[in-house]
Image: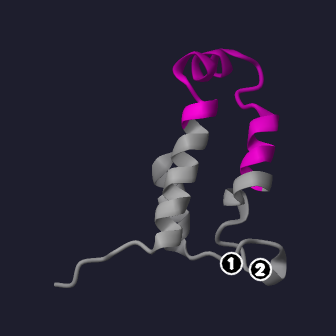
Amino acid sequence: MAEYRFTEEQQQLRTAVRKFCADNFDEPTVRRLMESDVTFDARVWNRLGSELGVLGLSVPEADGGAGGSLVDQAVAVEEF
């Protein structure tokens, strides 16, 4: 059976999402959000879309997305 290898871009995506999460979703922050009325930080989610492009990762470029594959999306979700 052939071994799957992630592309360099997918490895860079993994690193970027991991760092973003470490910088923005530490345990105290997550606990505070879980206990608040609004359980997410809209500014952080906006940055996920604008800086990393992960919110439109598997959306075709013609529709305003990044045009990535489902594997790209899985890489990002795994890091979350």
Q: Does the magenta stretch include residue 35?
A: yes
**Residue 64 vertical placement versus 53 (above, below):** below
Q: Which amino acid does label 1 sit on?
A: Gly
What distance separates the C-alpha of mark 1 from that of mark 2? 5 Å
Quadrant of residue 29 within the rendered picture:
top right
Residue furthest to the left = 1
Q: Which of marks 1 and 2 is nearer the N terminus?
A: 2
Query: Which residue occupies the foreground of this view, 15 or 66?
Result: 15
Element under disc 1: loop
Q: Is residue 17 magenta?
A: no
Report if the CB atoms under discs 1 and 2 are less than 8 Å apart: yes
Query: Which residue occupies the foreground of this view, 19 or 68?
Result: 19
Q: Mark 2 points at which residue?
A: 61
Q: Give the range drawn in magenta.
A: 22-49
Q: Mark 1 points at which residue?
A: 67
Mark 2 surroundings: few (<14), some (14-19) or many (≥20) residues within 10 A: few
Q: Residue 29 carries which label?
A: none
Which residue is at a point 72% across and 31% down the rendered structure image? 40
Q: What residue type is labelled 2?
A: Glu
**Residue 66 vertical placement versus 80 (above, below):** below
Which residue is at a point 71% across and 72% down the rendered structure image? 66
Q: Is the magenta stretch mostly helix, strand or loop?
A: helix
Which residue is at a point 52% across and 61% down the rendered structure image? 12
Query: Which residue occupies the foreground of this view, 59 or 17?
Result: 17
Element under disc 2: helix
**Coordinates of residue 55 in the picture (x, y in percent):** 71, 58
**Coordinates of residue 61 in the picture (x, y in percent):** 77, 80
**Coordinates of residue 32 in the picture (x, y in percent):** 65, 15
**Residue 59 vertical placement versus 24 (above, below):** below
Mark 1 surroundings: few (<14), some (14-19) or many (≥20) residues within 10 A: some
Which residue is at a point 47% across and 71% down the rendered structure image? 8
